Amino acid sequence: MQKIVILTGAGISAESGLKTFRDEDGLWENYSIEDVATIDGWIKNPDLVQTFYNERRKSVIAAEPNAAHYALAQLQEKYDVQIITQNIDDLHERAGSKSVMHLHGIITRSQSSLDATLTYPINGWEIKMDEVCAYGSPLRPHVVWFGEPVPMLEAAAARCAEADIFAVIGTKLVVYPAAGLTDFVPENVTRYIIDLDIPYIRGGNNVIKIQEPATTGVLKMVEQLMQL
């Protein structure tokens, strides 16, 4: 069974109504990165940070997987599929994808302020400020903030190196170290890239570009792959 590795970004979730962080009118237009996405911001004003991610979690819970999420899950009928996502939502899982690696954490879990490996499921959309981990430290969102290590990066790079087919969906490949994962894909591997704004990806004649939104472009890719 061939292995397909798929790197997804904010563009695929945006079509489910979730605001991106970087685009025009994105979340960073209304909030300072330093205030809500760094450990210093958490130390300075944990209530603001908690409120910010509670609201994001509420939006994620209300959102539904779109056609692109469901189409990627369909690939499992014929391929060994590994999704590596920069997104912190759980839409891939809800669409039926079984192997999803979250590079930047997942908003539906909390984590210890002292030990990032100690995580908990969240009942509902809210982490309350009086909730604590097993060490008695406040719970924070299970999200990788700027300046923090990306725990799953090494495992993700290893999966990219094993790919028989590789796809990039809904990301402009500007966020590192996640964007650097494309460098681990073997030279001879066919690469699909799907976005309204196609970024550069090495691979020469092995690159198939689909300049469309994920909800239409992914369906075209999946139709091709299911016919191989």
Image (cartoon, rainbow, N blue to C red):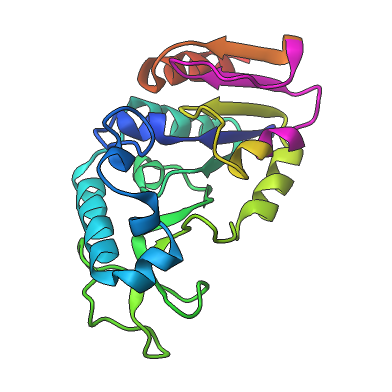
**Residue at image coords 25%, 42%:** 30
Answer with left or right where residue 7 lies relative to residue 219: right
Above or below, 51 against 196 in this view is: below
The spot of residue 75 in percent (x, y) is 52, 30
Q: Can residue 162 be seen in this view?
A: no
Q: What stretch is highlighted in magenta?
A: 181-204
> Would you identify the image quadrant in which residue 4 lies?
top right
Asked if residue 200 is among those painted magenta in the image, a careful observer would answer yes
Q: Nearer the viewer, residue 48 or 65?
A: 48
The spot of residue 41 in percent (x, y) is 37, 64
Above or below, 133 against 57 in this view is: below
**Residue at image coords 49%, 29%:** 171
Q: Nearer the viewer, residue 10 or 94?
A: 10
The spot of residue 25 in percent (x, y) is 26, 31
Q: In which quarter of the image is the N terminus?
A: top right
**Residue at image coords 39%, 27%:** 68
Asked if residue 225 is among those painted magenta in the image, a careful observer would answer no
Tally of numbered discs: 0
